Amino acid sequence: MIILAILIGIIGGYGAILFRFMIRFVQGSSFGSWHLDLAYIEAMPWYWKLIIPAVGGLIVGPIIYFFAREAKGHGVPEVMEAIILKGGVIRPRVVVAKIIASAVSIGTGGSVGREGPIVQIGSAAGSVLGQLIKVNGSQLRTLVACGAAAGIAGTFNAPIAGSIFALEILLGDFALTQFSPIVIASVTSTVISRHYLGNFPAFTIPSYELVSIWEFIPYALLGALAAFVAVIFIDVVYKAEDVFEAIPIPEWVKPAIGGLIIGAIGIFFPQIFGVGYETMDMTLASKLTWSFMLMLIFLKLIATSITIGSGGSGGIFAPSLFLGGALGGFVGAVTNMVMPELAGSPGAYALVGMAAVSAATMHAPITSILILFELTNDYRIILPLMMAVIVSVVLKMNLKKESMYSLKLIRKGLELKKEYEPNVLSKIKVEKIIQQGCLTVLADTPFEQLHNLTKESINLNYFVVDENKKLMGILSPHKIRKLENTKDTDTSKLTAKDLIIEKGIYFTPEDSLDMVGLMLNDLVLDEIPIVNNSKDQIVIGYISKTEVINAYNREMAKQDMLKSVSAYIGSAGKFRQLKMMDGEILCEAEVPGKYVGKNLSELDLRHKYGVEVILIKQNYDPDTKESEKVFVPNPEYRFSYGDKLLIVGAQNEVDWFMQQ
């Protein structure tokens, strides 16, 4: 893994250099200058500024639509999907399509960033290398994260942030077995990038410092405003996607329409073209007015949303930095007008705003804090920066739970994150544990007969039905006994209908047990009737509180053995094993890479290794879109990356299989 991480770091470093060169090549070819700046664009004829982004969209659309549709959009959600649902498998053609499509989008003025494309490019390279060597699923996922870290590190000259980005956003795991190769890939990529591009920060900023303790108030306000900007940014991006999705024209034409709109905005405000680093430098240097920065927030937000929503290819990290810089600069300028003697320069607020908006947009506070330090080489305002970032992330998660990345997957119907204790009863139908032998009584059954039933029957509840056997309600034997012992009540005229304690309480065989459990929590009943359907309501059985609890316990026991990830103990890389009484070992093992694409019939594991497959845990079911599915072995099922097996065999046989 260390050698592979170094190799991926080399690929990521050269990939980042190639990607940056291609962006500059496209910019030079389309705008006519290899050193593009705002003054040059402002001097261009208006019609070129209108046409160039539209032509770029016309090139990008067919590449994405006909070659690799994963290259559409900002790229990071597609990598997350591949890691969690597909075991890290990414198609090789994604590398080529993403490099070309993103370079053209950014180079022709698309209002997007470089980080999303380079993450997808590096991840795809790591995935392709892992598939060629046939590593197992967990190693393949780590190699994908290595590629992402290498891409970020090489592009932004930020090895620490590259590593944390891969761990915090893509994997969500800081385990040593994953951390080490990711850091090595990130460092390797940075060394190569610095060799060719030099060791320079992405932004040039003056000296900043915290002037007064009272500045924490506007910095906290900046964090709160950053959360609202992040929420609006996410909503507008996906609203733009919905709007363009509804336009009845071919998909591959839509990026050209988006490019035309971007060009129209860029005629008057060229600051929205491309990545926007020059404008960010101006906000950090406090060279823009508060009114212009406020206007740039809305213009950049709209421009980025149109670029991505129409089908362009590029990231959202640089646009979030742009929005944060403009927001921070605006807050800083206003603060200087309100309390000039107690406030630092607007540029300091712009720097903090960049971290706050990006952290809230991506739900990545650690990455945002570290990458801003590495992009600027400035650690002097760490306290207000950290406070604003935490305020923005906490408030944003209360306003909107999902990040820019995770929301895209949810919109596709993919549930990636499960709750700590899943609602296992929701997957069990009532029909699985329905009990027979319920006691039904007619509505006109007299009290004396009901009292005799309480002496003969062990049922905890009786179900009252009419002459057509339709359920009318539930009767408690306890109430009958209580009335019998009450001398003040005349029971001779009472019937079953008069003693009903609950009406309208029933379930059908198709209902799930979680509904039953919720109702039993709110009722004093121990048994609930099961009817054939909601219309006829013919009693066919009952379900008891005890049986629901037993079903829950059985399912949780199954979850503990099969659905929980056995993974590794410490950093030794050994799977958790259960020694049985006959000396054999029961354990969960990930499918070796060389067995991917093959089935049990072809592998004949019992004959080759002496192990028997008890259950299969499928990493992703494309039919139901469940991220995990457990089932008994099917000889014809073909394994995918990330699938796991519950196997049993002698210790030496299990160890031999695990080494494959």
Image (cartoon, grey):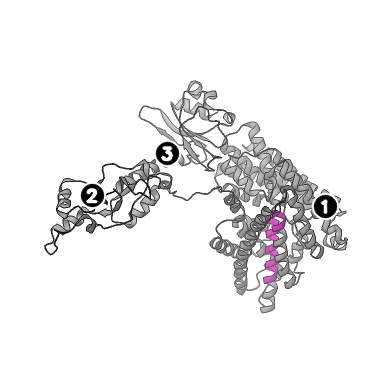
- Magenta residues: mostly which secondary structure? helix
- Residue furthest left as drawn: 487
Quadrant location, the N terminus: top right
Q: Callout 3: few (<14), some (14-19), or many (20+) C-alpha neighbours within 10 Å?
A: some
Tell me: residue 95, above or below residue 449.
above
Tag 3, which secondary structure? helix
Q: Which residue is mark 3?
A: 561
Give how far across and how far down residue 617 sits, in percent: 49, 36
**Residue carrying label 1:** 27
Q: Residue furthest front?
A: 467
Q: Residue visible at 42% across and 39% down?
A: 561
Distance of label 1 from label 3 (alpha carbons): 56 Å
**Image quarter of residue 98:** top right
Residue 457 coordinates in the image, percent (x, y): 19, 46
- The stretch drawn in magenta includes residue 308: yes
Identify which amino acid the numbered label 2 is placed on. Answer: Val
Tell me the magenta residue range.
Answer: 305-331
Quadrant of the snapshot with the C terminus: top right
Left or right of 431: which side holds 218?
right
Q: Position of residue 469 (x, y in %)?
A: 28, 48
From where the camera sits, is residue 208 visible?
A: no
Q: Which residue is mark 2?
A: 441
